[in-house]
Image (spheres, rainbow, N blue to C red):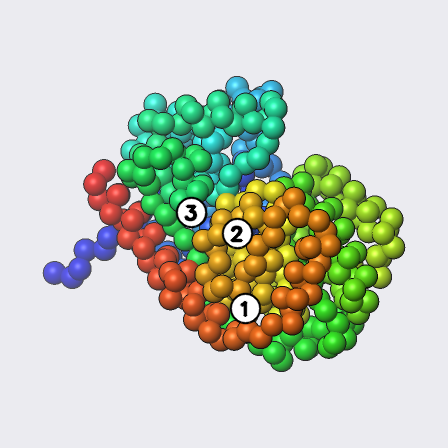
Amino acid sequence: MGDIKMRKVKVLVLITAMDRGGAETMVMNYLRNIDREKVQMDFLVIRKYKSDYEDEIKQMGSNVYHLNPILLKNIGRFKREFRKFLTEHREYTIIHSHLEERSYFPMKIAKKMGVPVRIVHAHSIPNDKGPKQWARLYMRNRLKGLYTHGFACSEKTAKWLFGNNMKNITIMNNAIDTEKFKANEKTGKKLRQQLKIDEKTLVVGHIGRFVKQKNQQFLIDIFKNVNNQRSNSKLLLIGGGKPKAEQKYKSEVMKKIKEQGLENKVKFLGVRDNIEELLQVMDVLVMPSTSEGFPVTLVEAQAAGVRCIASDRIDYKVNITDEIQYEALESDVVDWANRIISFTNTELDAEEMNRKVKIAGFDIKEKAKDLEEFYIGVSKSI
């Protein structure tokens, strides 16, 4: 008799959106590299609009479903819709939620409806104040007992969401395709020409959605001081955002650029799918975030051989190559600018940086196999 074909494991990925943010990019890295003959990852997106990655997800054979967002004013509607969805889709025995503390609502329903494997994934450490903070803490403190497994991008994010007890908690690296991000001088020169940037220009880069947490307004102040010292400098802002709040913050950043007289010094490149190439244009990547989990952007930048300067609110463990320098968020913009300029004058070994990222356990081919084995293992125990 021939081999009996193994039944495909069906996983429902619960996520806010599938745009080009850090968590979404990490999920896509795993989807692209997991054995899709063994594991079917389908997506329930808590947004009604079409996401950036949606076409690619469908091309790989995964399904994409949409629900209305989780908002306190319409939480009853979300509960009804999610309950209805699970009733109609009994095929999912594993739910992997990237909604962090907001997983409280779907996990409560999934547990009641008998979904055997319920994974909650921690990506960040929020820094909200007031009502938003209270709401987050309310949901977080009621998560315990609703999930069967916890995943996190780092120990710090795990402890924020799950507490100090690390039983059934797995640290899952924000892994990338290290080969794809290898430094390429030829690509960098070509893109500089396309962007009309001289080879001698100091290029400061930033990748992130336009939200207060990413702190782009502070970055403009920093860059103003860089430009005061190095007049042949440019700032590349990569990223975007569909929600109204992100559009509003972006307009505030644009206003500040105009006020500082930097219109000819700052380039808005929008949402891009060639980050590995754009990194080759940069002399330094700056991330002055007020809070982060374990930013995949910093992993990518290091693999690409790019120096990074990050705020002290970002996990120090992301410094895989010793080519990230940290600056206190409370430091003066002049201190930030001085650090950027002095750091870009140092030598680095891009090839060695890529190797360090790979051997540190951030290569997606290896990590996707680990996730695949996890899904298959838990499905066998059901």
**The one of 360 and 52 positioned closer to us in this rendering:** 360
- Residue 222: which quarter of the image? bottom right
- Answer whether labels 2 and 1 touch (C-beta < 8 Å): no
The residue that appears at 67% across and 62% down in the rendered structure is: 340
Relative image position of residue 63 (x, y in whole percent): 47, 46
The residue that appears at 61% across and 24% down in the rendered structure is: 130
Q: Quadrant of the N terminus?
A: bottom left
For mark 3, does the 10 Å Cα neighbourhood hold few (<14), some (14 to 19), or many (20 or more) residues?
Answer: many
Q: Look at the numbered disc 3 and give the secondary structure of its residue.
A: loop
Q: CA distance from mark 2 to mark 3?
A: 10 Å
Position of 68 relative to 11 (above/below): above
The residue that appears at 59% across and 61% down in the rendered structure is: 308
Q: Is residue 381 left or right of residue 314?
A: left
The residue beneath circle 1 is 304
The residue beneath circle 3 is 154
The residue beneath circle 2 is 295
Regarding residue 193, the answer to whether it shows in the image is no
For mark 1, does the 10 Å Cα neighbourhood hold few (<14), some (14 to 19), or many (20 or more) residues?
Answer: many
Relative image position of residue 339 (x, y in whole percent): 65, 60
